[in-house]
Image (tube, rainbow, N blue to C red):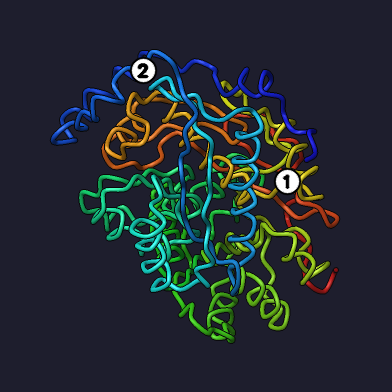
């Protein structure tokens, strides 16, 4: 950014903000029981340095930079890269051992293949000698890292990937920054309860579908249970094959027969686009349609144009959603830095990539042994913070994200408008009901 990035003084004003000591103490007790043994003492040469020296921390990972989900991978990589650049421009990470660490990133293209992820993460650890890892995007790719990081004992910060809590098996080295899959459909359900049901009793009639890949299945199953728990009438529930799906008309026909007011689907980009096209072909009109995470990207609107109008989806973060942050750059500073670097506004995946960096950075600042994965994993569970991205607070044992909550956006006149933010005033109003296909 040719010297236009945040100054060291200004960056560290935010990045050095204190985190409440009570949260550290409370989380620490559980971790002391969980980690056996506690992180080993380092060699004598690293004990309590009296004069800080310049060192390097090497962080590795993979992203799908090609393939159908590359829109996620490319954006998250940009967030990682921007974080590293701004940290280095500010002089590096002042860690808990008194030394300052320059950041080096090594990010490979996993081509959206779990087998590539496993191979490349092993390479990052054994050949590239990385200190820590940033997770890939989307569930199956994230799951492919688990046996590798557990085998070698390497601390990993997940980005836009998560796993089904039912699959958790005492994994020690992974922490999450996003609202995990089980909470995605809860976000739109809560909005319907708050904004829609009071004005339209028919909104209690909902259809739910999901793909059969790990992420979509997790979102759909947990969402279905949450919807029932909240007293809605699920008039139709089904799943479909994610891989190679080109025809969802049988499901759409059955949904049409069930006559829901609202249709919620858990799926990625390809399924979201396909559903819109085939719902229009079969004239399935609903009052609110939530097709899954794929609808959050500009590419979704560029592909569908007016047929995307009125469609709602969830987002981990969006420009315009402002939190009272106590760490890292402000909302405006992040958005402006990203715009200067890449010439466009960041989406939630890019913001997630930056948040990965902030979590690792804060853990290093608090950690006496900042290149030790056990010590870093312990530190990551001992603090809370609120960044431009929202709240970070994890279960200190599982690494599961507890603090962050999602918002809802709706395509209105070609723009994504934030129509629901939990516990905050929404910047825009929800348009309900959405227009029928023949009225567009």
Q: Position of residue 46 (x, y in %)?
A: 31, 25
Q: Position of residue 283 (x, y in %)?
A: 71, 78
Residue at point 51%, 31% (across, down)? 391
Is the residue 164 above or below the residue 239 in the image? Answer: above
Please indicate whether residue 122 sits to the left or right of residue 68 in the image.
left
Dot 2 and dot 1 residues touching (CB under 8 Å): no
Quarter occupied by residue 222? bottom left
Q: Is residue 275 left or right of residue 436?
A: left
- Tag 2: Cα neighbours inside 10 Å, few (<14), some, or many (≥20)? few
Helix, strand or loop for disc 1: loop
Is the residue marked by circle 1 packed among few (<14), some (14-19), or many (20+) residues within 10 Å?
A: many
How much space separates mark 2 and mark 1, taking CA atoms? 56 Å
Would residue 143 be visible to someone looking at this image? no
Q: Can residue 222 be spotted in the picture?
A: yes
Report the residue marked by disc 1: 430
Which quarter of the image is occupied by the C terminus?
bottom right
At x 62%, y 43%, the residue is: 317
Name which quarter of the figure residue 238 lies in.
bottom left
Q: Position of residue 83 (x, y in %)?
A: 61, 40
Q: Can you say whether 415 is above or below 357 in the image?
A: below
- Look at mark 2 in the image and give the residue it sits on: 49
């Amino acid at each position: 950014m040719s010297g236009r990035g945040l100054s060291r003084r200004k960056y560290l004003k935010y990045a050095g903000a204190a985190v409440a000591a009570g949260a550290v103490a409370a989380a620490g007790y559980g971790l002391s029981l969980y980690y056996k043994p506690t992180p080993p003492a380092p060699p004598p040469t690293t004990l309590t340095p009296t004069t800080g020296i310049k060192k390097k921390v090497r962080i590795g990972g993979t992203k799908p930079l090609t393939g159908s989900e590359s829109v996620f991978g490319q954006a998250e990589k940009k967030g990682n890269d921007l974080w590293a650049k701004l940290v280095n421009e500010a002089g590096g990470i002042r860690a808990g051992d008194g030394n300052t660490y320059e950041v080096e990133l090594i990010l490979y293209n996993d081509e959206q293949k779990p087998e590539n992820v496993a191979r490349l993460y092993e390479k990052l650890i054994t050949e590239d000698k990385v200190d820590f890892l940033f997770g890939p995007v989307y569930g199956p790719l994230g799951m492919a890292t688990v046996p590798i990081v557990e085998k070698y004992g390497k601390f990993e910060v997940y980005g836009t990937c998560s796993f089904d809590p039912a699959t958790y098996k005492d994994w020690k080295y992974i922490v999450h920054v996003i609202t995990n899959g089980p909470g995605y459909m809860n976000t739109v359900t809560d909005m319907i309860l708050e904004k829609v049901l009071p004005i339209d009793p028919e909104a209690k009639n909902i259809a739910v579908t999901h793909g059969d890949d790990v992420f979509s299945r997790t979102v759909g199953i947990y969402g279905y249970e949450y919807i029932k728990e909240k007293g809605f009438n699920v008039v139709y529930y089904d799943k479909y094959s994610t891989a190679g799906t080109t025809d969802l008309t049988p499901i759409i026909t059955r949904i049409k027969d069930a006559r829901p007011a609202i249709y919620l689907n858990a799926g990625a980009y390809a399924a979201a686009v396909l559903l819109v096209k085939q719902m229009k072909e079969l004239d399935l009109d609903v009052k609110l349609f939530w097709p899954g995470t794929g609808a959050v990207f500009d590419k979704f609107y560029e592909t569908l144009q007016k047929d995307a109008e009125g469609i709602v989806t969830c987002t981990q973060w969006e420009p315009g959603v402002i939190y009272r942050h106590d760490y890292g750059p402000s909302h405006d500073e992040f958005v402006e830095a990203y715009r200067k670097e890449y010439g466009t506004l960041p989406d939630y995946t890019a913001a997630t990539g930056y948040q990965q960096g902030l979590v690792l950075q804060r853990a290093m600042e608090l950690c006496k042994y900042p290149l030790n994965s056990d010590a870093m994993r312990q530190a990551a569970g001992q603090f809370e913070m609120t960044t431009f991205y929202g709240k970070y607070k994890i279960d200190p044992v599982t690494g599961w994200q507890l603090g962050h909550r999602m918002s809802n956006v709706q395509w209105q006149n070609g723009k994504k408008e934030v129509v629901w933010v939990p516990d905050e005033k929404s910047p825009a109003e929800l348009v309900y009901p959405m227009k029928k296909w023949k009225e567009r």
